[in-house]
Image: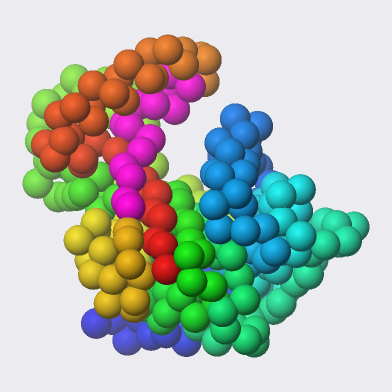
Amino acid sequence: MNNNQTRENVIDANVKYHTAHSATYHLQPHFKPENQVLFTEKLKKFSKKCGNELLVDLGCGTGFVIELATSHFSNVVGVDITPAMLKKVDRSLDNSSLIQADTEYIPLVGNIANVVTSNSYLHHLWDIEVTVKEAFRLLKNGGVFFCEEDPNALYWDLFDKKNLTEIEEYGNASEIIMRELSTVVNAHKNMGDETNTNPDLVKLAEYQKMVKGGMREKELERIFLTVGFKEVKIEYYWFIGQSHLSSQNRNNEIQIIEEYLRMLFPLTKNLFKYLRMEAWK
């Protein structure tokens, strides 16, 4: 293990990176209206099934989930370790509150939340299991921990050294493939340029993705079930090239391709970029 790959350094990298990112974080893809609609539908479903007294959002950032959840839950609590991100959260929402804390140690009593969420967050952690334990502790029986936009390791495996060599030797890869190649292989450099941050620091901040190589279904299932969750559902989504079709509003084609790729599981799981998870207590 590299000497700088420690829990403390990963936390420090996240604080520094997200401080630099806080002013432009609202430009992230999940803030797009269509993604807000999809996430809101999930929140509606959970509030009806689990109750709507309290939602706790882990790694709340600038308040993406908070702003959506306050219309569907009586109380919403956002937890984040980076002060600069919390300063960007809309403080006018009367039924929301914020806690600056490491999600390994959340200063709330247990068995109080109907729903716990994390959006594009788990892959920033040094140890996923410790935060999953905290989510479990916070939830009431029958509650759900909902996570999404975490990296599918099978997709990242597509861009290992062997495959990169094949792509380069092929010499006629499509624009879509080359764009995806850049977003994976050069992600730390691109994100560093966008935030004026050292690329090596970005790697540490994106620890589970850029250092560990993404997250795997079986390992996630093991973690959730070991912690005590009764049921775990993991969904693969956002196939390679989907952003190209989405930018042209070719939604019917997206639906057809997605359904076809799912018919071919498990052989096509590596063509989906992200994982979405529901863990029920």
Q: In this orientation, which residue lies closer to the viewer: 51 or 168?
A: 51
In the rendered image, which quarter contains the C terminus? bottom left
Left/right placement of residue 70 relative to residue 277 reads right
Q: In this orientation, which residue lies closer to the viewer: 23 or 256?
A: 256
Q: Is residue 20 visible?
A: no
Residue 117 appears at what percent x and percent y?
A: 54, 60
Total tally of numbered discs in the picture: 0
Q: Is residue 174 visible?
A: yes
Q: Residue at x 82, y 62 (%)?
A: 95
Residue 125 appears at what percent x and percent y?
A: 43, 72
Residue 81 appears at what percent x and percent y?
A: 63, 76
Q: Residue at x 45, y 49 (%)?
A: 149
Residue 242 appears at what percent x and percent y?
A: 39, 26
Task: Answer with the quarter of the image where residue 260 lies.
Answer: top left
Left/right placement of residue 272 relative to residue 13 reads left
Placement of 273 over or under 106, stated as above or below:
above
Placement of 176 over or under 125, stated as above or below:
above
The colour scheme applied to this rendered structure is: rainbow
Task: Answer with the quarter of the image where residue 222 lies.
Answer: bottom left
In the rendered image, which quarter contains the N terminus? bottom left
Q: Residue at x 33, y 45 (%)?
A: 235
Q: Residue at x 75, y 64 (%)?
A: 75
Left/right placement of residue 80 relative to residue 264 reads right
Q: Which region shows up in magenta?
A: 233-246
Placement of 167 over or under 151, stated as above or below:
above
Q: Is 236 a magenta residue?
A: yes
Q: In this orientation, which residue lies closer to the viewer: 25 or 95?
A: 95
Q: Is 123 a magenta residue?
A: no
Left/right placement of residue 188 relative to residue 78 reads left
Placement of 88 over or under 38, stated as above or below:
below
